[in-house]
Image (cartoon, grey):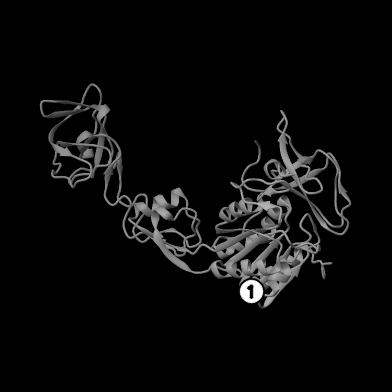
């Protein structure tokens, strides 16, 4: 039996106190490898963006005052003085009543303060006729208009995506200073579990948990290290855990944590050192047998073998810890208001999590439909469920037609 069931709130507080999750350190990596990493420093611009006044259109660089009053029936006539190409410094200077041909993105030549769009001009025998006057700085993007030198453009703690990496590239940054990625060892237990790709013998099942949990590790900023499947043998599990703690910062296992004679994972963990098991059993359904321990400063999450339970408890307990160790911010729970399509009961004395799929009718109303998990767990629950509804310990049931809050797992809302 479990020594003492903690409430989920107590378990979360205990983990925050004992684990004190924080970034593992900082490293510099090439910009092209920085996607989904967390910036570890403020970034200030060392140059203006753009670094020079540039044309935003194809046309002619001119002195704006030379075009004043120009119109269709009374064009201003300017003498061509040269051409300005993109990617090089202008070799011409625009004087009074002169114009320099220019392309989009090219630097504005000395003397010019505006650009006339080519559509509003006509070129003939060294002359440019301007049929529409322009004001000063028309069609000119000024130096520093986008980013000014010395401006703070990205803050420490920012998760880098395509847009942020584009900004860093524009500033000439070749490497990003980011928080290190926590390495998470993932292993499965049980004589019935077989690695995908191998022949499935009678009585065996393929390893679901290692792959779903490894992907969950990636989604929250960690690096999964898949160590394989191990039998429910105390000595083999002890050696597997020892290896896991050697090569990783966090250990996540599934199976072997209930109260059967083969459920020896907590014993194997406790034999490796102090403090050992710090939490054994949580008053939730599913996920009651969840065990958490530490060897030195490294945590281990020993999750149930039930695939849905393992993924749910990972979401509730392990995901927040891994995110903080990866330098990511505390997550704001993504929720959707919906209407229950069936009565949902709680397990007596335990906070109950009911997996649901969101559906939407023609009027736009959103409904939460329970996804059956069965006694031993339907594998398809993982694919069908959009999220879960929480039935509190002190509530007997949620009734059909009642408004509920659905906590979203992942980013998918509707198929």
Q: Position of residue 158 (x, y in %)?
A: 50, 58
Total marks placed = 1
Q: Relative to 268, say whether 150 is above or below.
A: above
Q: Relative to 87, say whether 350 is above or below.
A: below
Q: Relative to 373, say whether 125 is above or below.
A: above
Of 20 and 149, nearer the camera is 20
Q: In this view of the protein, can residue 222 be seen by the observer?
A: no
Name the quadrant containing residue 326: bottom right
Q: Position of residue 286 (x, y in %)?
A: 78, 54
Side of 98 where 242 appears, left or right: right
Q: Position of residue 226 (x, y in %)?
A: 57, 57
Q: Residue at image x 46%, y 53%?
A: 35
Q: Residue at image x 58%, y 62%?
A: 184
Look at mark 1 in the image and give the residue it sits on: 295
Of 162 and 236, nearer the camera is 236
Q: Residue at image x 44%, y 52%?
A: 164
Name the quadrant containing residue 235: bottom right
Q: Position of residue 201 (x, y in %)?
A: 68, 46
Q: In this view of the protein, can residue 367 be seen by the observer?
A: yes
Of 89 and 76, nearer the camera is 89
Side of 28 where 344 appears, left or right: right
Query: Could you tell me which quadrant the C terminus lies in?
Result: top right
Q: Relative to 410, say whether 185 is above or below.
A: below
Side of 277 where 248 appears, left or right: left
Residue farthest left in this picture: 125
Query: Could you tell me which quadrant the N terminus lies in?
Result: bottom right
Residue farthest top in this picture: 73
Number of residues whose C-alpha sits closer than 10 Å to that of mark 1, classed few (under 14), some (14–19) or many (20 or more): some
What SS does tag 1 mark? strand
Of 95 and 347, nearer the camera is 347
Residue farthest bottom in this picture: 274
């Amino acid at each position: 039996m479990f020594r003492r069931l903690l409430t989920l709130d107590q378990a979360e507080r205990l983990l925050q106190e004992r684990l004190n999750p924080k970034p593992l350190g900082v490293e510099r990596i090439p910009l092209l490898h920085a996607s989904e990493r967390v910036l570890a420093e403020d970034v200030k611009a060392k140059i203006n963006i753009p670094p020079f006044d540039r044309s935003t259109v194809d046309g002619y660089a001119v002195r704006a005052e030379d075009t004043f009053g120009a119109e269709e029936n009374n064009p201003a006539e300017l003498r061509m003085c040269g051409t300005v190409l993109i990617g090089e410094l202008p070799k011409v200077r625009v004087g009074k009543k002169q114009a320099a041909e220019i392309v989009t993105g090219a630097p504005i030549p000395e003397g010019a303060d505006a650009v006339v769009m080519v559509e509003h001009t006509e070129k003939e025998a060294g002359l440019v006729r301007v049929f529409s006057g322009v004001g000063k700085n028309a069609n000119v993007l000024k130096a520093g208009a986008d980013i000014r030198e010395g401006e703070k453009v990205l803050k420490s703690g920012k998760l880098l995506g395509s847009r942020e990496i584009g900004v860093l590239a524009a500033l000439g940054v070749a490497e990003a200073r980011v928080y290190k990625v926590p390495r998470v060892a993932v292993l499965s237990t049980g004589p019935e579990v077989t690695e995908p790709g191998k022949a499935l013998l009678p009585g065996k099942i393929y390893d679901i948990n290692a792959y779903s949990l490894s992907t969950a590790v990636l989604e929250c900023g960690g690096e999964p290290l898949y160590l394989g499947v191990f039998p429910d043998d105390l000595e083999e599990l002890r050696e597997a855990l020892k290896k896991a703690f050697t090569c990783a910062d966090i250990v996540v296992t599934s199976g072997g944590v209930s109260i059967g004679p083969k459920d020896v994972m907590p014993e194997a963990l406790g034999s490796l050192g102090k403090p050992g098991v710090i939490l054994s059993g949580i008053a939730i359904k599913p996920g009651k047998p969840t065990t958490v321990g530490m060897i030195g400063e490294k945590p281990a999450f020993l999750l149930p073998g039930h695939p849905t339970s393992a993924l749910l408890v990972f979401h509730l307990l392990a995901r927040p810890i891994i995110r903080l160790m990866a330098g990511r911010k505390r997550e704001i729970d993504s929720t959707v208001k919906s209407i229950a399509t069936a009565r949902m009961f709680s397990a007596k004395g335990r906070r109950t999590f009911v997996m649901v799929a969101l559906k939407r009718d023609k009027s736009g109303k959103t409904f939460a439909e329970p996804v059956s998990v069965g006694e031993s767990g339907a594998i398809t629950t993982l694919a069908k469920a959009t999220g879960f509804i929480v039935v509190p310990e002190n509530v007997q049931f949620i009734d059909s037609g009642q408004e509920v809050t659905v906590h979203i797992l992942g980013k998918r809302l509707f198929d």
